[in-house]
Image (tube, helix red, strand yellow):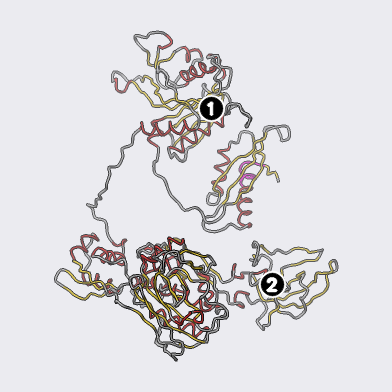
């Protein structure tokens, strides 16, 4: 629901800026989800000024262009103009250099000083469609004004600025579905005076167009009020009324319809205006019709009614679906002179079922479905009638009809003081609780020693029991004013799940299997010769088996690599060369720490990944390719993301097991290593193809994993992609580039990718060329070209200054 900041000020004093007001409303339970600026003219005509054409002559190099000089205050600008109607002495609207103009159609663009056909032009003399003031492009706007040159166009055209608060209205708060409804909460929260527009001037001027009303279904229609106005003039609404409606996203239609929409959003009471001359039989009947009856609505669609659809009818046919949508025949048109104005209270159940059946959602049905105030119909009717007389003319030409068969009385609810303390968690004095309730229009009608009785008005459809009344006290008192005690506790329906490393491993297994990996299980016993041959050493000493069955199973493994290579060799020898394997296992070593057996031996949970061969089996649709280090790195990154592991550092690896690779660090702890296995090691297993291997510390992954996730709104403002090509020293890594970029511009740069790397004879020796892609986004507004260029210039400066890069332009 949209609430206009300026509109709201008509009912209550608001010294707070919109942001502070939003906090106050959110604290009362009306959560403000966003605050958006609004201007009656897009862009607010910023940078546009009133100017005067001092000279005007033909362009020497173009027949259809003129060269002018235009006074814009203390400056005289040369401007080349293409309009045929430009002439000396005219008062015009000028966009000076640097101004961003917002045309009626098309994208905004910025005015720059330039040369047009060899002549300097420092601005633009504007047509109305070029600055969003109309559709015409027949020529420049010529003003009939004595306004001084340089007067801001926003001041001349009286552009209005506003802020619109988007409130996430909960279904129970129908009372707040209007500007006055929101103002009521502010009145209670801030102890201020609420000003409701007066309707005392309403009076019946004659009874020449009395239209009787009959309500047949009093269950579906709790109250029906109406009045007739004659001699109105249907035309466009005045600017103030249009601005009010446009600020909350409504499109003005005509003065009569706009007034009914205005009163709806002012008071929360839906209204409907009928063309009185289209009411056949000069009588209105509120009733349901037989199922299957056809009815054409304002959107020119024929709908089939159900037996539960409440209809507003004349003596021959239906005119409107009550509380939902009007009919095509009885609506207000330019030829309407006499109107029948309806203000009613319809049953929420009937309106909800009808709206769902016909798939119709309107501002009126939104309020009726939640419950409107039956005691508000007459006030809203009188308010609308007075506005119609003021804006559209006419006279009140009937008695005010008010069919109210069973008056809805206030609800009486007894409240015990001990329950206030019990439910709120803090003792609030009786006097303060009663003051809060009375500020919410809930009068205290009876008082006992330990309780009191509250009279709740019908418009508070959500307050039906004692707990609801106490919630109202708490809502205005302030949730943030309830202190937490030292003994605070909570109840919950289920136990918190224990962290389980086996469940964690199953989660990672499912992901890897989904990516085409097969799980293997190898023996923890391995051959000491594998590491002795290459003089490999690991943490601690190998754990030897005392009664070993063979030398091939003589020690407990200190790395997952050798048993994994055995499996790779087994598969390659059987023509299964495209391998994606993983294993959860343990490595072991012996520490030199004396006789304490519990400290002498160490075992660690590890996750090993192996890939080799081609990325996929050869097929007719896709050309296959050999796997690379980056295919393995992608799988490792996905494992880290699954563990919600953030801020992982990468460092170049110097390890005798790898030709090349990277070390992964979380703080000072190593999470794992990955890279290409040395050819000398794969040769020992008679493997002639490349093997890429990752070794991850499962226990550290598990302990570091953060199972929490954050849900955030999809950004409202677009992201922008910019690419940059640069030549750097060969040893510069992508991690260094990323660190420099984020250190230079962390707020707006959301993603950095490398989409090409080149090394060759076309660039100097010892250099390589990176092609980088930057995704820029500001979550609070749309980035301008100037802001984007500023960021990219800052990044280019950082690359040149700190990395000695050559930018390829």
- Report if residue 804 lies within the magenta region: yes
Q: Main secondary structure of the magenta part?
A: helix
Going by the picture, which residue comes out furthest to the bottom? 206
Residue beneath disc 2? 136
Q: Residue at x 44, y 35 (%)?
A: 668
Residue 266 lies in quadrant: bottom left
Question: Would you identify the image quadrant in which residue 443 lies?
Answer: bottom left
Where's residue 653, x and y in %?
Answer: 52, 28
Foreground residue among 457 and 365 = 365
**Residue 213, image x, y percentages:** 40, 80
Image quadrant holding the N terminus, namely bottom left
Decide whether residue 632 is among the magenta residues: no
Name the residue that disc number 1 marks: 675
For marks 2 and 1, the one nearer the N-term is 2
The residues bearing labels 2 and 1 have C-alpha atoms spaced at a distance of 66 Å
Q: Is residue 411 left or right of residue 737?
A: left
Extent of the magenta region: 798-805
Which element type, helix, strand or loop, lies under badge 2?
loop
Q: Is residue 517 above or below residue 241?
A: above
Residue 73 visible here: no
| Total numbered circles | 2
Relative image position of residue 581 (x, y in whole percent): 49, 25
């Amino acid at each position: 629901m949209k609430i206009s900041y300026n509109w709201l000020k008509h009912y209550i004093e608001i010294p707070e800026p919109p942001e502070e007001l939003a906090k106050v409303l959110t604290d009362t339970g009306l959560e403000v989800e966003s605050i958006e600026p609004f201007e009656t003219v897009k862009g607010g005509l910023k940078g546009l000024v009133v100017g005067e054409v001092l000279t005007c002559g033909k362009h020497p190099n173009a027949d259809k262009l003129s060269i002018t000089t235009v006074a814009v205050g203390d400056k005289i600008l040369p401007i080349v103009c293409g309009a045929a109607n430009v002439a000396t002495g005219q008062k015009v609207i000028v966009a000076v250099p640097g101004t961003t103009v917002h045309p009626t159609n098309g994208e905004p663009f910025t005015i720059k000083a330039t040369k047009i056909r060899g002549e300097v032009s420092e601005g633009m003399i504007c047509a109305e469609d070029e600055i969003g003031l109309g559709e015409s492009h027949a020529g420049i706007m010529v003003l009939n004004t004595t306004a001084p040159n340089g007067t801001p166009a926003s001041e001349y055209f009286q552009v209005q600025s506003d802020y619109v608060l988007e409130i996430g209205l909960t279904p129970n708060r129908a009372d707040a579905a209007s500007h006055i409804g929101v103002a009521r909460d502010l009145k209670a929260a801030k102890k201020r005076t609420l000003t409701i527009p007066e309707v005392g001037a309403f009076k019946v001027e004659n009874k020449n167009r009395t239209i009787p009303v009959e309500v047949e279904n009093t269950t579906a229609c709790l109250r029906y009020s109406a009045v007739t106005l004659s001699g109105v003039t249907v035309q466009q609404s005045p600017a103030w009324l249009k601005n009010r409606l446009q600020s909350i996203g409504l499109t003005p239609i005509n003065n009569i319809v706009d007034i009914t929409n205005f009163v709806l959003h002012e008071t929360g009471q839906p209204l409907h205006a009928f063309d009185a001359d289209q009411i056949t039989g000069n009588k209105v009947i509120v009733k349901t019709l037989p199922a299957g009856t056809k009815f054409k609505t304002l959107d020119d669609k024929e709908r089939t009614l159900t037996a539960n659809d409440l209809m507003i009818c004349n003596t021959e046919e239906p005119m409107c679906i009550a509380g939902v949508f009007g009919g095509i025949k009885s609506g207000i048109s330019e030829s309407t002179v006499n109107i029948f104005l309806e203000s009613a209270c319809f049953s929420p159940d009937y309106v909800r079922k009808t709206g769902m059946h016909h798939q119709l959602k309107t501002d009126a049905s939104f309020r009726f479905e939640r419950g409107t105030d039956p005691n508000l119909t007459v006030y809203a009717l009188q308010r609308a009638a007075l506005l119609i007389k003021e804006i559209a003319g006419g006279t009140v030409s009937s008695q005010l009809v008010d069919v109210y068969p069973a008056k809805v009385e206030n609800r009486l609810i007894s409240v015990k003081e001990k329950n206030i303390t019990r439910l709120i968690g803090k003792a609030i004095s009786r006097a303060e609780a009663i003051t809060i309730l009375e500020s919410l229009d809930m009068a205290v009608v009876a008082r006992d020693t330990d309780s009191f009785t509250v009279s709740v008005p019908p418009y508070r459809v959500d307050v039906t029991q004692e707990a609801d009344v106490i919630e109202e006290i708490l809502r205005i008192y302030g949730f943030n004013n309830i202190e937490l005690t030292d003994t605070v506790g909570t109840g919950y329906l289920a136990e918190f799940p224990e962290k389980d490393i086996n469940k964690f491993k199953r989660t990672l297994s499912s992901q890897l299997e989904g990516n085409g990996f097969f799980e293997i299980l190898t023996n923890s016993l391995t051959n000491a010769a594998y590491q002795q041959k290459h003089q490999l050493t690991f943490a601690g000493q190998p754990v030897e088996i005392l009664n070993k069955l063979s030398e091939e199973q003589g020690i407990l493994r200190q790395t997952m690599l050798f048993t994994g290579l055995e499996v790779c060799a087994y598969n390659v020898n059987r023509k299964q060369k495209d391998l994606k394997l993983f294993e959860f296992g343990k490595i072991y070593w012996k520490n030199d720490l004396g006789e304490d057996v519990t400290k002498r031996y160490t075992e660690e949970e590890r996750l090993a990944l192996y890939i080799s061969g081609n990325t996929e089996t050869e097929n007719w649709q896709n050309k296959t390719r050999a796997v690379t280090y980056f295919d393995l790195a992608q799988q490792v990154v996905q494992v880290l993301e699954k563990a919600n592991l953030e801020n992982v550092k990468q460092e170049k690896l110097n390890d005798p097991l790898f030709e090349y690779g990277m070390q992964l660090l979380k703080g000072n702890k190593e999470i794992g290593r990955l890279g290409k296995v040395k050819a000398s090691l794969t040769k020992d297993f008679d493997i002639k193809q490349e093997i890429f291997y990752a070794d991850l510390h499962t226990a550290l992954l598990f302990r570091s994993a953060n199972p929490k996730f954050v849900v955030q709104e999809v950004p409202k403002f677009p992201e922008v992609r910019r690419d940059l090509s640069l030549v750097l020293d060969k040893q510069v890594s992508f991690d260094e580039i990323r660190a420099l970029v984020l250190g230079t511009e962390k707020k707006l740069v959301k993603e950095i990718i490398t989409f090409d790397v080149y090394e060759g004879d076309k660039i100097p020796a010892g250099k390589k060329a990176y092609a980088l892609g930057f995704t820029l986004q500001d979550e609070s507004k749309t980035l301008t070209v100037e802001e984007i260029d500023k960021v990219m210039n800052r990044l280019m400066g950082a690359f040149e200054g700190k990395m000695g890069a050559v930018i390829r332009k």
